[in-house]
Image (tube, grey):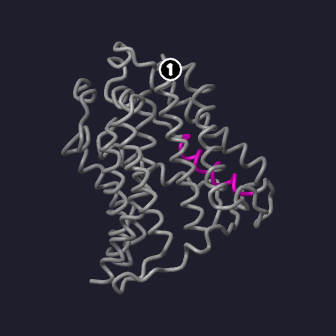
């Protein structure tokens, strides 16, 4: 029983991360119909901003050397500004084109950011040590839980509550929610498109910076591909939850994270390496039963 609870906590912690990434993807998709694959590179840039650019395997710290509050502020600000810059330069001029063009632009931004990181940091993984105090385990009712997982779940819950309050209680949040549900109708009702889209990208940047820090604290490494798989899984989560649905993105994130960890823990050892196939099978099964995901928005219904 104790082992199952520990596995469940691992699953919820991973699901929390996927939920945050899925929410960032879902927000941008809601207002622009853009699958922003550069979200993975926002996470990578946030992580690499912790160190001074160099090809060393153990680089000197940059933002990572600051006190905790200042470090969190600088990393999230860096990623937020990057997200706003890419929106302004790469996506806004193409807003009225088709989704394929936006998708290609997203890939171009992604490869551009990867090339920048390769240029300044090199391609080999790096070791970094921040948040060492969070790696020790905390014992609760006889169950040892790594502190970083408690922090991950706490941060995810705090961000989700803050985002819900922002979306429901503030005029900007209501405009953003309306645009995510039906962007064209929201524009006809006077919602300013540029501001709403910029807010969506800013939130995706804040979430990206936060995820960067959580990943680095968990793994202690920097890798140019570290944002790829979380973003791929989060994309699956948005599809499962109902693409364009913000609550669906969060729900899908937790489903994907929990299923992934449960498969890793309980599959026979000889087939454990094929865990991802199980997750992908789940995606296919859900889409066969509910092609528009678990939570369908009004905009999605109109496209049926």
Query: In this picture, is 114 found above or below 174?
Result: below
Please give the name of the residue rendered at 31% of the width and 29% of the height, measured from the top-left corner. Answer: 181
Residue in front for this viewpoint, 125 or 75: 75
Between 5 and 132, the one nearer to me in the picture: 132
Q: Which of the two residues, 148 or 22, is positioned nearer the viewer here?
A: 148
Q: Quadrant of residue 163?
A: top left
Q: Position of residue 22 (x, y in %)?
A: 41, 46
In the displayed structure image, the side of residue 152 where residue 135 appears, left or right:
right
Q: Secondary structure at mark 1?
A: loop
Q: Look at 33% across and 69% down and name the residue there.
A: 262
Q: Is-magenta flag for residue 128?
A: no
Residue positioned 47% across, 34% down in the render = 200
Query: In the rendered view, would you say 287 is above or below 138?
Result: above
Horizontal relation, residue 11 to residue 121: left or right: left
Residue under the point 32% across and 24% down? 182
Q: Which residues are magenta?
A: 38-51
Q: Position of residue 270 (x, y in %)?
A: 38, 77
User: In the rendering, at what x and y percent does residue 84 appear?
Assistant: 59, 33
Q: Main secondary structure of the magenta part?
A: helix
From the top left corner, tell me how far across and down residue 215 is, in percent.
55, 61
| Residue named by callout 1 | 95
Would you identify the image quadrant in which residue 304 lies? top left
* 202 over 267 or under it: above or below: above
Above or below 241: residue 177 = above
- Residue extending farthest to the left is 289
């Amino acid at each position: 029983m104790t082992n199952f609870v520990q596995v469940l906590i691992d699953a919820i912690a991973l699901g929390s991360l996927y939920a945050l990434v899925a929410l960032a993807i879902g927000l941008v998709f809601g207002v622009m119909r853009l699958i922003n694959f550069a979200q993975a590179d926002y996470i990578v840039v946030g992580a690499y901003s912790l160190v001074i650019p160099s090809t060393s395997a153990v680089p000197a710290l940059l933002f990572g050397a600051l006190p905790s509050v200042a470090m969190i502020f600088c990393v999230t600000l860096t990623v937020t500004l990057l997200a706003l810059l890419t929106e302004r330069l790469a996506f806004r001029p193409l807003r009225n084109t088709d989704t394929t063009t936006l998708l290609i632009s997203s890939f171009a931004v992604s490869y551009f950011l990867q090339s920048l990181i390769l240029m300044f940091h090199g391609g080999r993984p790096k070791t970094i040590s921040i948040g060492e105090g969070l790696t020790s385990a905390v014992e609760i009712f006889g169950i040892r839980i790594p502190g970083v997982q408690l922090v991950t779940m706490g941060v995810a819950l705090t961000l989700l509550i803050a985002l819900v309050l922002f979306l429901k209680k503030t005029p900007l949040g209501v405009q953003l929610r309306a645009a995510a549900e039906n962007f064209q109708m929201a524009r006809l009702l006077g919602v300013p498109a540029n501001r709403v889209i910029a807010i969506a990208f800013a939130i995706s940047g804040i979430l990206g910076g936060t995820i960067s820090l959580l990943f680095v604290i968990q793994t202690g490494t920097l890798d140019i591909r570290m944002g790829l798989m979380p973003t791929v899984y989060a994309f699956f989560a948005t599809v499962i939850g109902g693409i364009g649905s913000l609550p669906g993105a969060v729900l899908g994130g937790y489903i994907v994270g929990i299923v992934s960890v449960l498969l890793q823990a309980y599959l026979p050892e000889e087939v454990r390496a094929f865990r991802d196939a199980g997750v992908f099978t789940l995606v296919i099964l859900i889409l066969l039963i509910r092609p528009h995901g678990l939570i369908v928005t009004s905009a999605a219904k109109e496209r049926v």
